[in-house]
Amino acid sequence: MLALSKVGGYDAQQNRSAAEPVSVSVTFGNMYTKEIEAFGRAVLGEGEIPVTAEDAIRSQKAIEDVYRLNGFS
């Protein structure tokens, strides 16, 4: 289960007065198509897979925690 203390806690007040603005560049499109195209490019040696095995394991653990916390085990 995700422990909030391990990720810096949670600011319930959402105090953003000290936060600096961040610019984020976003390319719109179908995320599934983009995922398959990125994988295909990696297979062909034209790029890298944009996520790691560790990313996949972390996501799966989070999904399992949600199911478990809601009584599905």
Image (cartoon, grey):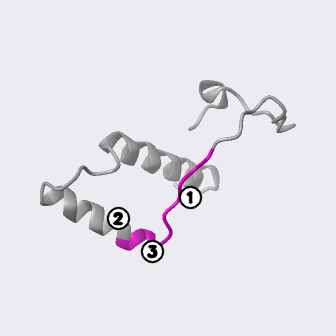
List x then y, in percent, for residue 33.
Answer: 36, 73
The residue identified by callout 3 is 30
Magenta-drawn stretch contains 49: no
Residue type of the residue flagged with mark 3: Asn
Q: CA distance from mark 3 to mark 2?
A: 9 Å
On residue 35, the disc is 2
Is most of the magenta stretch helix, strand or loop?
loop
List x then y, in percent, for residue 17.
Answer: 84, 33
Residue type of the residue flagged with mark 2: Glu
Q: Earlier in the sequence, mark 1 or mark 3?
A: 3
- Identify the residue at horizontal 53%, vertical 54% (top origin): 25
Residue type of the residue flagged with mark 1: Phe
- Identify the residue at horizontal 48%, vertical 64% (top origin): 27
Q: Earlier in the sequence, mark 3 or mark 2?
A: 3
List x then y, in percent, for residue 50.
Answer: 33, 50
Mark 2 or mark 1, whichever is nearer to me: 2
- Identify the residue at horizontal 45%, vertical 74% (top origin): 30
On residue 10, the disc is none
Q: Earlier in the sequence, mark 2 or mark 1?
A: 2
User: Which residue is at the far right?
Assistant: 13
Q: CA distance from mark 2 to mark 1?
A: 29 Å
Nearest to the observer: residue 5 or residue 31: 31
The residue identified by callout 1 is 72
Quarter of the image with the N terminus in it = top right
Q: Magenta stretch?
A: 23-33
